[in-house]
Image (cartoon, rainbow, N blue to C red):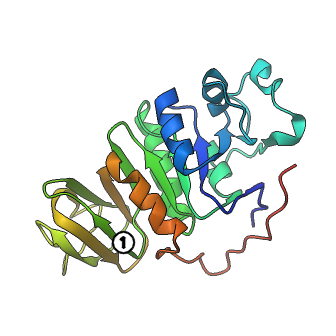
C-alpha cells in the first residue's frame, strides 16, 4: 500500500539522475507540466533552472547543498533499500501518465531496473524518454498513426501474446517469451494497432510519438488494472 505524495490530473514528469539534458526536460514538461525529481534528478532540475514540486527517493544521490534549496515539505525521503528510487517515485504519484526523463542511457543495470519497475507497476502508465525512442509497457490496446517504415520493437519481459495490424510482421498467434522469442525491429506499414492478453511487453517506438502516447492515456485509453489486492489510498494534497 503506497500513500500518494503527488497528485495531478495532468501528466507528471519524473526526472531521474541518468542521462538527460535541458532539451529533454523541456520537451517532457510541455506535455507533463508537474515536475518531480527522483533523488539525484534534483541536480539536473536545478541546473536547468527549475524547482521541482517534490523530491522523492532515499536521497543518497541528492547533494545536501541541492536539498538545501528545496523546502522541507517538498522533500520525501523513503529510506528502504528493497526498491529503486524510480520505483519509489512511480508508486507514490497519482496521474493519468508519467513521462520519465533521465532513466535511459548510462548504466545498463539502471535501465534494466527501470524496465522491471514498468512491469511491477503495470497499472501506472509511464513513458521513458530515450535519446531516440520512447519506451513503455504496452497497454492492453493501443493505436498509433505511424509512418510507413518506422521501427516498432516489441520485447517481452514475461510470456505474453497478442494481435496486431499495420505491422510488416504481424504478431497474431505468436507466443512471446524472453527466453525463446522476441519481436524487435519490426516495421510499421502505416497506422499500427496492437492488443495484448497480459501486461509484460515493452513497446519501443520513435521519440516523435511521445505526444500521441501521452494523449492515449490522458484521453482515457486502455490501461492495465491494478493487481488483485493492490490498493492506493486517496491522494493527499501536496504541501
Residue sitting at x 79%, y 61%: 3
Quadrant occupied by the N terminus: bottom right
Q: Nearer the viewer, residue 169 or 106?
A: 169
- For label 1, the crowd category at 10 Å Cα-Cα, with few meaning under 14, some 14 to 19 and many 20 or more, is some
Position of residue 29 in the picture relative to residue 88 (left or right): left
Residue sitting at x 17%, y 58%: 186
x and y, in percent, of residue 208 in the image: 33, 48
x and y, in percent, of residue 135 in the image: 39, 52
Residue sitting at x 42%, y 60%: 213
| Quarter residue 194 falls in | bottom left
Q: Nearer the viewer, residue 187 or 121?
A: 187
- Residue where numbered disc 1 is placed: 142
Residue sitting at x 67%, y 50%: 88
| Quarter residue 172 falls in | bottom left
Q: Secondary structure at mark 1?
A: strand
x and y, in percent, of residue 86 in the image: 60, 46
**Can residue 20 be seen at all in this image of the molecule?**
no
x and y, in percent, of residue 129 in the image: 44, 44
Position of residue 26 in the picture relative to residue 160 (left or right): right
Position of residue 154 in the picture relative to residue 166 (left or right): right
Q: Nearer the viewer, residue 144 or 4?
A: 144
Amino acid at each position: 500500500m503506497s500513500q500518494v505524495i503527488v497528485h495531478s490530473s495532468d501528466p507528471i514528469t519524473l526526472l531521474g539522475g541518468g542521462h538527460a539534458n535541458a532539451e529533454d526536460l523541456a520537451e517532457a514538461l510541455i506535455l507533463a507540466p508537474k515536475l518531480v525529481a527522483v533523488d539525484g534528478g534534483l541536480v539536473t532540475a536545478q541546473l536547468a533552472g527549475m524547482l521541482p514540486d517534490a523530491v522523492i527517493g532515499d536521497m543518497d544521490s541528492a547533494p545536501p547543498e541541492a536539498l538545501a534549496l528545496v523546502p522541507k515539505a517538498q522533500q520525501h525521503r523513503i529510506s528502504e533499500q528493497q526498491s529503486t528510487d524510480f520505483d519509489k517515485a512511480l508508486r507514490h504519484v497519482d496521474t493519468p501518465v508519467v513521462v520519465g526523463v533521465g532513466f535511459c542511457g548510462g548504466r545498463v543495470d539502471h535501465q534494466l531496473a527501470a524496465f522491471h519497475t514498468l512491469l511491477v507497476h503495470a497499472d501506472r502508465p509511464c513513458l521513458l524518454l530515450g535519446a531516440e525512442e520512447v519506451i513503455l509497457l504496452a497497454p492492453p490496446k493501443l493505436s498509433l498513426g505511424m509512418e510507413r517504415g518506422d521501427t516498432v520493437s516489441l520485447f517481452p519481459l514475461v510470456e505474453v501474446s497478442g494481435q496486431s495490424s499495420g505491422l510488416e510482421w504481424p504478431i497474431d498467434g505468436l507466443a512471446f517469451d524472453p527466453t525463446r522469442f522476441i519481436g524487435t525491429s519490426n516495421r510499421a506499414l502505416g497506422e499500427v494497432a496492437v492488443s495484448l492478453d497480459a501486461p509484460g511487453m515493452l513497446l519501443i517506438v520513435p521519440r516523435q510519438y511521445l505526444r500521441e502516447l501521452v494523449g492515449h492515456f490522458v484521453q482515457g485509453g486502455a490501461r492495465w488494472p491494478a493487481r488483485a489486492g493492490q490498493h492506493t489510498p486517496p491522494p493527499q494534497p501536496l504541501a
